[in-house]
Image (cartoon, helix red, strand yellow):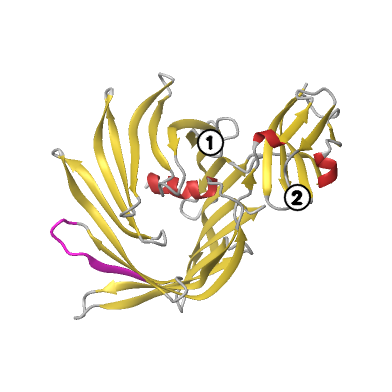
Amino acid sequence: MKTLYLIALLCALCASAFAQTTITLPGKTEYYVWNDEPSPGTWQGAGAYTHTYNNRGQETERIHATDAINISRSVNTYENFLLKESIAYLWDMLTTAWKPTLKSTYVHDAQGRVANIVYQSSTAGGPLTNTVKSIHLYTGNEKKPHTVVHQNWDPATGTWKDDEKDTNFMWVSEATNPAGFIMYETQTYDAAANAWTNVERVNTSYNATTRTLVMTTEEASGSTWVNSERETITYDDKKNITGMLIQEWNNNAWELDNEVQYVLTYNSSNVLTERITKMRDNAGEALENAFREVMSDFQSFIVTKSAEQLPASSLAVFPNPTNSSLKVALSNVSFQEAQVELFNLQGVKVYGASISHRSLTSGAHVIPAEHLSAGMYILHIKTDNNKEISRRVVKN
């Protein structure tokens, strides 16, 4: 569901205070499905996933296979630890080779924010072709977008065409709401009228005591909103999902669509070692076993969280706008060395240098800009103790 996509997206957008933490991840996940034909029912093996990570614990490859054959594979590529590309493959038994079926390409701006995502897919084993593009729009230096525009690829004209957009986001911190947002609206584009029309709105609320997130989807009806769907998601004290109840609005009441519950098992180090999925589709039914995952071959990673954002008052850039060079100074910041970089609005680095504390805090550092084309640039400074700040600068 799109709301779950947005939760996943938020994880990539959120900034947190500078700290180190240890995460433990499985190298192998055995997968089982429930077979209820024998009495009693039994878990039947359906293969295993093997996981490969980089040194920050980001998954770079996942392969699903049985003892006999390969099934599927996903490969993630990162640049400066930002997701750049994700490709899904299926195993072709005729050619005994992996064939790409889906591809997502991520473009980030100079501040490390997602600028756009291009999705491609393959039909009947053919080449990957454009399908959807998502463009993320921001206000100033905000880390989270106010609007995400989704465009469809038109092969006849070879152009992207507006389809719908998620807009009017109201964001909150993940600490107070796992969804990360309070509300957003979805609108569709009418090319003939050159106008956007409301389609649905998603609202969230979170009860920290019961660790319960409620996400309500409303449909547009004229100038009003009417209930459509509700997702109630519960978490344990380790922030893992333990249940998801999906309901639809019918005859002025919420009716069950489906329900999923997860039975989680942890070891003595509070690492998740097993997850059993139970499901039901009808209100009168009991929850039944569906899937079982058993994790093993654990690996631990010490990772640094996102850089601490320095206050705007700590950075002086002058003159701005400039006709020639820029003088840069940091004040009231402790560090030994900092990376000073200048990017154009396409994300291309046009200047970069490692500068000492003495030079940068004295205001002696100068960025030559005479050769740069007129326009806007992003100055980005990151210290060796993981603090950073960005500033827009203009070259006349």
Q: Which mark is residue 149?
A: none
Question: Is the residue 327 above or below the residue 111 in the image?
Answer: above
Q: Which residue is mark 2?
A: 335
For the C terminus, the quadrant is top right
Q: Residue at x 58, y 63 (%)?
A: 57
N-term-proximal mark, 1 vs 2: 1
| Outermost front residue | 332
Camera-nearest label, 1 or 2: 2
Task: Using residue 193 as the reference point, say whether residue 34 is left or right of it.
Answer: left
Q: Is residue 289 visible?
A: yes
- Percent x, y of residue 269: 47, 74
Task: Indicate whether 5 appears above or below 280.
Answer: above
As drawn, the label of residue 135 is: 1
Q: Position of residue 88 (x, y in %)?
A: 51, 57
Taking the spot 58% from the left edge, 47% from the top edge, the residue there is 105
Is residue 283 rendered magenta in the image? yes
Asked whether residue 346 appears in the rendered view, the answer is: no
Q: Residue at x 35, y 51 (%)?
A: 208
Q: Residue at x 15, y 38 (%)?
A: 252
Magenta region, residue range: 282-293
